[in-house]
Image: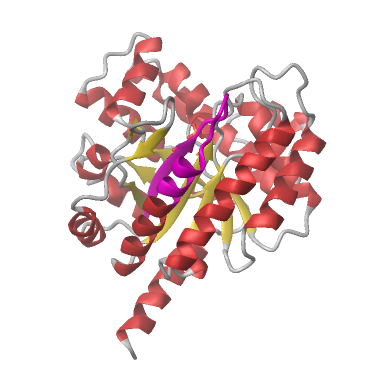
């Protein structure tokens, strides 16, 4: 067998595992500063022990593998052991969830372009990817951010971020890792849903243009993006049906059918709104890609609040995570309803 063929096979196996029916990906890769802010809002000290305890709580949730196919870790978590000495990636693989790693180094101000950002982390990436693969990672994530406002986004910023995403994706595939390519369009702003659709389309088209240019295999990556929504401060908020229609139309116009899966980020929507809109999108049907979720806040908000830094709350926090994951799984089947929110923790989702 040719080496290239072998590599292809293992990338395909990871893609299939991540896109298992009615399962999503848990994004738990918040940086020190992002998780620090979320802990601080609840008065939880952001110590290494607390971060480990929290991630151990998430990954150790009994039954999570029924709804979650994989999890994205930060570098710190990837290298941490549980309190009883099991490496975090092994906690996941031991329960049939695929471990992945966020490999970008966060956002920096885009020089010469006010309020725009570029994503750092290409230096030394090839070596880091080889180490992560060796230590058990099977997929990677890189997030680029586009914001909407007066004069934004610029073509230059869109282009630059798309090129970095394509280099990241190419290097990941070379290392035998499935890239999750994440060009996020932020919700903040007064813009209408039509503007969000237009910007998302321009960003996605630039990203796929760059991916083509870099020879990235579309069959061996996942796209992670936001839903097409009205800006948070827009006076007129689109309803779920309009969100579903605009989101799917935008993807059809910009995402090649060769891409196996599109997984949504939650982007600051409330947990229930993210689930409801996911359900509306999945109910529409007819998409050439498998649709999934890769929520961070949308899965963790309630669990983090419930835990609140106390070992006594671990079981209740895990029940909250499991509940949200179950609702999101139902949404992928287009079977979510307000009724699902009333499931008692521990009850099977049999809808
Ligand atoms: P949210 O679902 O909280 O937007 O996070 C997803 C993510 O991975 C951001 O990079």
Q: Is residue 349 visible?
A: no
The quadrant of the rendering that contains the N terminus is bottom left
User: Foreground residue, 315 or 110?
Assistant: 110
Across and down, in percent, residue 46 comes to 26, 19
- Please provide percent x and percent y for residue 248: 73, 49
1 over 12 or under it: above or below: below
- Image quarter (top left, top right, bottom left or bottom right) of the C terminus: top right
Quadrant of the image occupied by residue 310: top left
Which portion, as a residue range, is magenta?
140-162
Magenta highlight on residue 143: yes
Does 236 sit left or right of 190 as displayed? right
Residue 94 versus residue 260 in the image, above or below: above
The image quadrant that residue 172 belongs to is: bottom left
Please report the residue visible at 40 percent of the width from the left and 11 percent of the height from the top.
41
Q: Nearer the viewer, residue 14 or 348?
A: 14
Quick check: 350 left or right of 269?
right
> Magenta includes 49?
no
Residue 15 can be seen, yes or no: yes
């Amino acid at each position: 067998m040719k080496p290239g063929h072998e590599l292809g096979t293992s990338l395909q196996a990871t893609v299939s595992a991540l896109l298992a029916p009615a399962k999503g990906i848990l994004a738990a890769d918040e940086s020190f500063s992002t998780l620090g802010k979320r802990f601080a809002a609840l008065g939880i000290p952001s110590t290494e022990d607390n971060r480990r305890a929290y991630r151990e709580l998430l990954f150790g949730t009994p039954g999570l593998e029924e709804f979650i196919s994989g999890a994205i870790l930060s570098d710190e978590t990837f290298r941490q052991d549980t309190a009883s000495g099991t490496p975090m990636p092994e906690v996941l693989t031991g329960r049939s969830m695929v471990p992945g790693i966020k490999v970008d180094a966060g956002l920096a101000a885009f020089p010469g372009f006010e309020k725009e950002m570029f994503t750092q982390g290409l230096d030394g990436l090839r070596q880091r990817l080889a180490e992560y693969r060796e230590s058990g990672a099977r997929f990677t994530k890189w997030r680029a951010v586009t914001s909407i406002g007066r004069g934004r986004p610029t073509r230059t910023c869109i282009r630059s971020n798309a090129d970095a995403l394509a280099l990241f994706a190419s290097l990941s595939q070379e290392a035998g890792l499935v890239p999750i390519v994440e060009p996020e369009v932020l919700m903040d702003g007064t813009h209408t849903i039509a503007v969000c659709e237009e910007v998302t389309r321009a960003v996605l088209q630039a990203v796929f243009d760059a991916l083509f240019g870099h020879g990235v295999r579309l069959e061996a990556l996942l796209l992670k993006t936001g839903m097409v929504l009205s800006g948070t401060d827009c006076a007129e908020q689109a309803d779920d049906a309009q969100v579903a229609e605009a989101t799917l139309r935008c993807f059809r116009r910009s995402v090649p059918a060769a891409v196996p899966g599109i997984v949504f980020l939650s982007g600051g929507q409330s947990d229930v709104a993210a689930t409801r809109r996911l359900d509306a999108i999945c109910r529409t049907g007819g998409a050439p890609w498998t649709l999934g979720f890769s929520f961070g806040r949308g899965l963790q908000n309630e669990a983090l609040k419930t835990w609140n830094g106390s070992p006594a709350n671990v079981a209740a926090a895990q029940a909250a995570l499991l509940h949200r994951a179950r609702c999101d799984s139902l949404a992928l089947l287009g079977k979510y309803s307000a009724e699902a929110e009333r499931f008692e923790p521990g009850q099977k989702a049999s809808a």
